[in-house]
Amino acid sequence: MPCPVTVWLPASLVALFPGARRQVELDAASVDEVMDELDALWPGMRDRLCDSRPAVRKHINVFVEGEKAVLDTPLPPGAEITILTAISGG
């Protein structure tokens, strides 16, 4: 059953979607449901975060309460989900 959660989005992603916010409150029971809810708010966001397998894209990291998560990770009520883009360099 979906429960209220807080999602933190990276500035680089928010910049691509007019009206998107860095912090958003959603009702979701899993990371997959978070992706669906984000896409309902800002169409196309799920495609930026997930690939066709479906899975979280390689250059995206999702954390639930500080622990690395995948799409089927369940969410406890009040969870904080942080979505980050991978940083690379050389």
Image: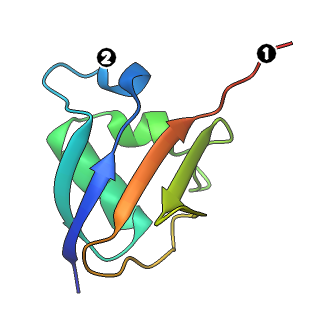
Q: Residue furthest bottom?
A: 1
Quarter-of-image position of residue 22: top left
Q: CA distance from mark 2 to mark 1?
A: 21 Å
Compared with 41, 53 (above or below) is: below
The residue under label 2 is 15
> Label 2 neighbourhood size at 10 Å, few (<14), some (14-19), many (20+)?
few
| Quarter occupied by residue 36 | bottom left
**Amino acid type indicated by mark 2:** Ala
Q: Is 52 or 85 nearer to us in this picture?
A: 85
Report x, y in % for residue 57: 61, 43
Q: Position of residue 90 (x, y in %)?
A: 86, 12
> SS of the residue at dot 2?
loop
Residue at 31% x, 17% y: name it: 15
Q: Quadrant of residue 3?
A: bottom left
Give the percent coordinates (x, y) of residue 8. 34, 45
Q: Quadrant of the N terminus?
A: bottom left
State the mark number for residue 71: none
- In this rendering, position of residue 5 left or right of residue 86: left
User: Circle 1 sits in a helix, a strand or a loop, which is it?
Assistant: loop
